[in-house]
């Protein structure tokens, strides 16, 4: 019970601290679609903060199940208990890799497509198309498989368990990979509407929590799919009706790229 309490407290404090840092650092930085990501080091720091804020609540059932199974195996004479943070480190390592890939795509698009992706030319259509594509992904078998794994902590651990710290790290990486497969489309949406938007960050964090934790999450994912397709079409043709989305052409910043 004490171990479970410590894990719950750690997850709660980590989430609150991450949101506090995110709000402090991101307030006033939202430039809508095409928001500059800054230098690599500053982006990685902010990205990990965002991942902790957005993903810790939805990954909590998996982390708690890992901690309980780990403790029970120790009580039965199995190898020494592995710290839960090792599993969490593997999980966030995968999300760090996702962030690095996204950052690289951003730089490539910035270098080769600045004129083509101007908001007044094609940027709104690229942004809307990316969001609609993310909505369609919600309906694919890949999304369903990854979501089922994320929603079934005990089943996942029973079939994938490995002993020791390296085993726990591997478990975290495997689960993180399923989580990326489940949620990467949602983060495509976040990049499309503006990575520094606290409004969209909170909204998508709520979507992830509903999908992965609540009993009706699988059904809700299909409803979200339709909503995202509609959102993509709206952004492509009249983004002024979308709440929390400043259009680059309406802002003082000269940065008007989609990516």
Image (tube, rainbow, N blue to C red):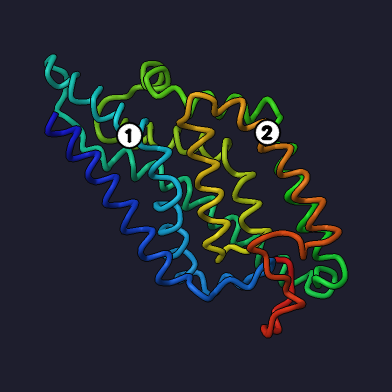
Residue 245 sits above or below residue 223 on the image: below
Q: Judge left or right: residue 1 versus residue 180.
A: left
Q: Quadrant of residue 63?
A: top left
Label 1 SS? helix
Q: Residue at x 35, y 37 (%)?
A: 60
Q: Residue at x 37, y 65 (%)?
A: 21
Question: Is 73 drawn above or below residue 170 in the view shown?
Answer: above
Instruction: Report the front residue among 226 and 143.
Output: 226
Question: Residue 95 location in percent, x, y?
Answer: 48, 48
Q: Is residue 28 left or right of residue 142?
A: left
Q: Could you say where residue 199 lies in the image, as x and y percent from the top left?
A: 55, 60
Residue behind mark 2: 223
Mark 2–mark 1 Cα distance, whole angstroms, equals 27 Å
- Quadrant of image for the C terminus: bottom right
Viewer-proximal residue among 217 and 140: 217
The quadrant in which the N terminus is found is: top left
Residue shown at 45%/52% (left/top)?
A: 51
Report which quarter residue 88 is drawn in.
top left
Q: Which residue is mark 1?
A: 63
Q: Residues within 10 Å of mark 1 (few under 14, many from 20)?
A: many
């Amino acid at each position: 019970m004490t171990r479970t309490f410590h894990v719950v407290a750690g997850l709660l404090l980590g989430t609150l601290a991450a949101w506090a840092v995110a709000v402090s650092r991101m307030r006033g930085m939202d430039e809508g679609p095409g928001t500059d990501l800054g230098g690599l080091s500053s982006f990685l720091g902010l990205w990990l903060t965002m991942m902790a804020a957005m993903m810790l609540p939805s990954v909590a059932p998996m982390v708690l199940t890992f901690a309980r199974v780990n403790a029970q195996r120790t009580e039965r004479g199995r190898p020494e208990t592995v710290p839960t943070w090792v599993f969490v480190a593997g999980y966030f390592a995968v999300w760090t890799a996702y962030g690095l890939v996204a950052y690289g795509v951003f730089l490539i698009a910035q270098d080769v497509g600045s004129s083509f992706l101007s908001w007044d030319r094609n940027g709104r259509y690229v942004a809307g198309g990316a969001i609609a594509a993310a909505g369609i992904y919600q309906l694919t078998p890949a999304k369903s498989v990854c979501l089922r794994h994320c929603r079934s902590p005990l089943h996942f651990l029973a079939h994938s368990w490995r002993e020791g710290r390296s085993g726990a790290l591997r478990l975290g990486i495997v689960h993180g990979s399923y989580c990326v497969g489940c949620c990467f489309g949602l983060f495509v949406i976040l990049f499309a509407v503006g990575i520094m938007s606290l409004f969209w960050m909170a909204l998508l964090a709520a979507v992830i929590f509903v999908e992965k934790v609540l009993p009706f999450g699988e059904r809700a994912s299909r409803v979200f799919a339709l909503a995202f397709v509609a959102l993509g079409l709206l952004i492509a043709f009249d983004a002024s009706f979308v709440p929390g989305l400043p259009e680059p052409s309406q802002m003082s910043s000269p940065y008007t790229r989609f990516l």
